[in-house]
Structures are given as structure tokens and as C-alpha cells.
Image: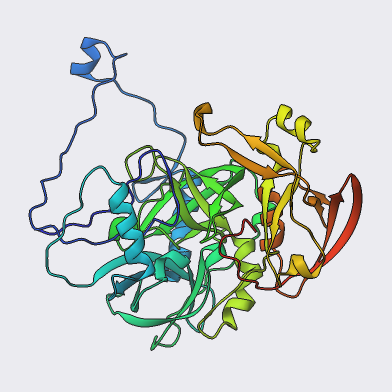
Amino acid sequence: MKRSLSMLALTGTLAVGGLIGYELNARTAPAPVVTQAAPDANLSAGSRTQGQMVPAASSTYDGGRARTESEANTVQVVKDRQAGLVYVSVRESSASSAQAQLRQRLQQQLPFSLPDDGSGQAQTGTGSGFFVTGSGDIITNNHVVEGASEITVRLHGDKTEYRAKVVARAPDFDLALIRAEGLPAGAARPIPLGDSDNLDVGLKAVAMGAPFGLEFSVSEGIISSLERRVPVGTRGVQQSVIQTDAAINPGNSGGPLLDSAGQVIGVNTQILTGGTGQSAGVGFAIPVNTVKKLLPQLQAGKGGVIQTPTLGVQFTDLSVLSAAQRKQAGLPAQGALIQEVAPDSPAAAAGLRGGTTSKLQLDGPSGTQGNADTLNTDGDIITAVDGQPISEGDDLRRAIIGKRIGDRVNLTVQRAGKTRSVDVTLSAFSFPTSNQ
């Protein structure tokens, strides 16, 4: 017997980029356990045996089927947009691929071992996507297709598999554009893109995708929050996301989150688990305006990777220091204290300086001795980017990652107690160990 087992099982953690439903062939899988719901403790003994009629909610009827206004809207949205949903399958031929390495890291963190059929065959994974053009362009998550040696897609109601190729990837935003090949004329039905800046908490959210390899599935909820920031992409920069309680599970990655008008408002990407490795009612979607901003670059990508700029500095977030530590070193409450500037980086070209001599000793974990660290405190302190204050370190990361290569940014910098303005021209400088 075969079944699909999710790799997403990190206890109480944010399942970043782990929504692919990996299909591992288990020849001796245990039978599923079906549990009946327990009776309500507030019911009397008599009501349990006899039951009680409960008035139905106000609704209209269509051929004997109940239709509230909300139900009718959801049904119409699904009917109108289901042709734009894409079921994505990937195959990995190399154990060194990004997804194979992700799977290995997850296995090392899990409290149990995952089944292996011993065949040595390539692993397969599933995800979701949706058409954005009539020519077959499909948006999905980068973590769905990164490292895949083969990508195929299927459309709703059609078992035909079509090969797809990566047009471009944006790893720092966990987005990718793939293009299906050989589609019949008119088969690609793009879903219109909405405006994620014009949302309110409480609005309807409809998630479409292929959870656990189930090729077409719909869940409904609301927009739970528009104030969430979670690590997104390969660098894990904290970025704004849409939080929803619509069920999002492994395999939903890359699928659309729709509003009641049937417009895409987000791309399903992550879930917060409660130790189950599946939906706990807290899911996150990349805002569609991020997709709209990157789409022209993705379409012109020619199979490449959209690079984001860096400053080329290592810095310390002053907001994480205690008030006593900041007072001891004469540091402000907020800002990015530069520890090191990489040679030939944009920061170096602009004349930014790292710390050299002054040091602040930090306590080690739980106050243990021998685990202390020190900070250089005489480096430049970046307090604002383009006039926007830096209240925490991720403010600087978000400001830079949101720019394009070649853009100029104006930094407000404190040096030796004096404030100065520094213009920096950004580039795709490679500084693997940098904070920014």
C-alpha cells in the first residue's frame, strides 16, 4: 500500500518553505485511525438519545441545495477560477539538490525516521501554481521547483501531464515563474491579480491547491492579520505576509489565495504548525503585490535567478541589547551598528566603516562563563534608510531587499556622535556570511 507522507513535521515551528507534499512510498504503512467526535459535554442524557431540532440558518435553496449568500459566492469563485489552478509535480535526480538537502535536514530534526522503500529511485514532490498569462506562464513557490530535474504540470479536470521549464526564480521572495509547454490553445486560463494593499482583516480568503497530493482542493477562511512578518526566502529576511485561517497544508505551496471577487491576493507559502506538521489554522501567503512587482523581471529571466542587492556589511541590531549595555557603550536605542564592511562592497565604496577597537562584552547563554562575546562599538550606526527609521535590524534588511540592483539609497549614519548622510549604489555583492 502506498500513501503520501508529509515532510512538514517540525514541532511548534514555522514551516518555512516546507509545504511540498513529498511522496514517499511506504510499503507497510499503518491503517488510518478514524476517530468519532465526542458528544458535547453540555448535552443532557436525554438529548443525546433523542436529539433536538435546530433551526437552520437563513438561506436560499437551489434545487434542494442550501445556498447562503456566502456559500453562493464561494461556489462561483471556485467555478470561475478552477481552470486557472495548476498541479505541479517535480522529480529530483540528485541527492545534492536543494530539495533533497532540505529533506535531509528535516529528517535530522524529526523525532522519528521516515519510511524509505529502498528503491533508490528519485524522490518526487508536489505543489501548486496558477496561470498568470494565457501563454502558459505559471506562478509558484521557489521552494517547489528549486533543484528539480524535471517539472510537469496538470490542469484541473485533465490527467494529461505537460512538461514545464523554469523561466526565472526569485529565491529571496520564495517565488518562481515556470512555463508549461505544449498546452492546447486556450488551456491556460490566467487568474486576475488583485491588490494586496487594499485588504482588510476579516475579508474572505479562499485557498486553492493540492494539499497532500490531492490534486484539486478548496478551503475557505478569512484574512486573520495583515501585520505579520515571517522569514521568507533563502536568506530568511522577515517580510510582510497575509495571515489566513483558510486551511493550508503540504502541497498547497504556490497555490493562489483568492478574495470574494475571485482575484489573487496572495501566494500560499508557509504554515505555523502546532506539532502536527499540517494546518493549525495559521497560514501565510506572499502578498500578490510582491508578485506584480517581480513579474516583469521573472518573465524576462531566461532561466536565471533574480538577484537582490546587498550592502556588504555585518551589523548588530541595537534594539536587542539591554538598556544597560547601550548606556555602557554610549549607543542609541535603535539602529544597525556596523561590525565589518566587506572590501569592494557597495558599503565600502560609499565609505562606511566598521568597528575596530572599542568593545562591549556580552554575557553568554544563561549567563554561563566562557561563552561571552564582544562587540566593536565604534563602527558607523545606520539609523534610517531613505528617511525611514531603523527600529530593528530587519528594517534594514527589508529596505535593501526591496530595492533593485543599481538603485541608490540614502542612509542616515551616526559616526563619533555626529549624524551624516551617505548615498550608496546597490549591487549584487556576494557576502555569504553577512547580515545584509
Q: Residue 182: x percent and y percent?
A: 38, 89
Q: Nearer the viewer, residue 239 or 135?
A: 239
Q: Nearer the viewer, residue 259 or 325?
A: 325
- Above or below, 56 against 219 in this view is above
- How does the figure colour the protein chain or chains? rainbow
Q: Residue 396: x percent and y percent?
A: 71, 53
**Residue 30: in sight, yes or no?**
yes
Q: Is 90 placed left or right of 416 in the picture?
A: left
Q: Quadrant of the C terminus?
A: bottom right
- Above or below, 65 against 371 in this view is below
Res 364 → quadrant: top right
Q: Is 72 placed left or right of 148 in the picture?
A: right
Q: Residue 92: x percent and y percent?
A: 30, 73
Q: Quadrant of the N terminus?
A: bottom left
Q: Residue 51: x percent and y percent?
A: 24, 20
Q: Which residue is drawn at the image coordinates 43% and 63% (left, top)?
A: 79
Res 155 → quadrant: bottom left
Q: Nearer the viewer, residue 433 or 104?
A: 433
Q: Is 62 placed left or right of 113 in the picture?
A: right
- Total number of numbered discs in the rendering: 0
- Above or below, 148 against 371 in this view is below
**Residue 126: in sight, yes or no?**
no
